Image (spheres, rainbow, N blue to C red):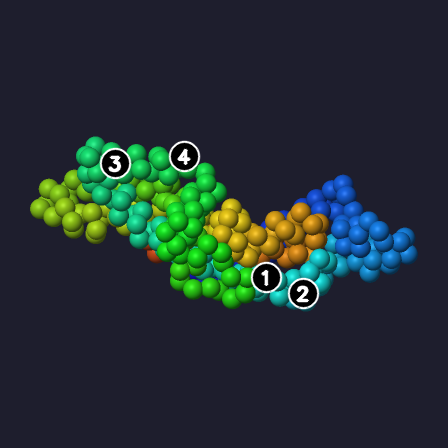
């Protein structure tokens, strides 16, 4: 398993490099002059040219990209053109907030969404099932920004249970995180409930579940010991995808609640043509998604014994080839 993880991590390197090349090319060949955003329209030509030379924009595209990647492999993500601070420092300020939002949102989604989906599958076509599916349909149809604004208006402005603005410095308090977490969770929970329900229904109708029921196993035992584990694979995929995307920045939620996270930072960097900051953010997002996908694949092996046996067979075949 360790060899598999190392191999996947090594495969991730050229993928991230490829993504960085595409993004760097898009930023380089997009119309517009980022230097004008820095020096302003009133700057003289000497100041303008000096800034271009300082940023290395007079060099050919490939030279600039190679120099940038050399610095990346040395651990230097460069300096932000607009903030005049290190990109690693800006990411260091934003990553903890995005990480907290991702963990709390996904955790709350699992805590609420999975039981709803399981009960809906067990009590198919019941009042609970119909009401929960209707509620999930309503959640799906709600625009995320509208939901966030309504929650803020009701609970922060009218009732004043929670603060309306997120602090510019620090991580805030628990009260600051409740509304953003609920907003993110609600936007993802509908898909989780529907996925859990459909996979549970498929598993419940399987022959081995009927066999367990025929042997006298209780409904609770059948659901928890037999059905749930085999229904987890699609759920794990969905949760991993959502977590990876959230680590890339919950842009709408961060904008609505004023959270200075990765998504907020990335959008500001793109609009201001801050190439080092955009590249640093994209590298972080791509790496996060790749690592989360790897973690999901490893979880597959531990959840489903059939995949574990397939992995062992592949390992035996590869060792035999090496011996030959």
Q: CA distance from mark 1 to mark 2?
A: 9 Å
272 left or right of 210 in image = right
Local secondary structure at mark 1:
helix
Q: Which residue is mark 1?
A: 91
Q: CA distance from mark 1 to mark 4?
A: 33 Å
In depth, the one of 210 and 124 nearer the eye is 124
Earlier sequence position, callout 1 versus callout 4: 1
Marker count (numbered): 4
Q: What residue appears at the point 39 percent right and 49 percent down from the top-left corner?
A: 158
Earlier sequence position, callout 1 versus callout 2: 2
Quick one: label 1, few (<14), some, or many (20+) residues within 10 Å?
Answer: some
Q: CA distance from mark 4 to mark 3?
A: 16 Å
Q: Which residue is mark 2?
A: 86
Local secondary structure at mark 3:
helix
Q: Which residue is mark 4?
A: 141
Q: CA distance from mark 3 to mark 2?
A: 51 Å
Q: CA distance from mark 1 to mark 3?
A: 42 Å
């Amino acid at each position: 398993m360790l060899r598999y993880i190392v191999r996947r991590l090594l495969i991730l390197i050229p993928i991230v490099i490829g993504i960085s090349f595409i993004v760097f090319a898009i930023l380089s060949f997009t119309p517009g002059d980022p230097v004008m955003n820095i020096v302003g329209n009133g700057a003289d030509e000497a100041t303008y040219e000096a800034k271009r030379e300082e940023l290395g924009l007079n060099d050919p595209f490939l030279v600039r990209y190679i120099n940038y990647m050399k610095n990346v492999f040395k651990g230097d993500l460069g300096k932000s053109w607009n903030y005049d601070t290190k990109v690693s420092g800006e990411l260091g300020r934003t990553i903890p907030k995005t990480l907290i939002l991702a963990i709390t949102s996904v955790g709350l989604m699992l805590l609420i969404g999975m039981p709803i989906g399981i009960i809906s599958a067990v009590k198919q076509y019941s009042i609970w099932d119909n009401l929960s599916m209707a509620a999930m349909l309503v959640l799906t149809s709600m625009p995320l920004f509208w939901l966030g604004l309504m929650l803020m208006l009701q609970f922060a402005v009218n009732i004043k249970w929670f603060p309306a603005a997120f602090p510019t410095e620090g991580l805030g308090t628990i009260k600051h995180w409740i509304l953003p977490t609920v907003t993110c969770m609600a936007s993802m929970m509908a898909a989780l409930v529907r996925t859990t329900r459909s996979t549970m229904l498929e598993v419940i109708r399987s022959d081995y579940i009927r066999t367990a029921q025929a042997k006298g196993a209780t409904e609770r035992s059948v659901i928890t010991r037999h059905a749930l584990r085999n229904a987890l694979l699609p759920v794990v995929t969905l949760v991993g995808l959502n977590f990876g995307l959230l680590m890339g920045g919950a842009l709408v939620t961060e904008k609505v609640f004023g959270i200075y996270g990765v998504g907020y930072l990335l959008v500001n960097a793109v609009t201001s043509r801050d190439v080092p900051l955009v590249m640093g953010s994209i590298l972080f997002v791509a790496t996060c998604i790749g690592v989360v996908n790897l973690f999901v694949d490893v979880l597959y092996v531990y959840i489903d014994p059939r995949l574990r046996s397939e992995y062992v067979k592949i390992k035996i075949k590869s060792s035999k080839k090496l011996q030959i």
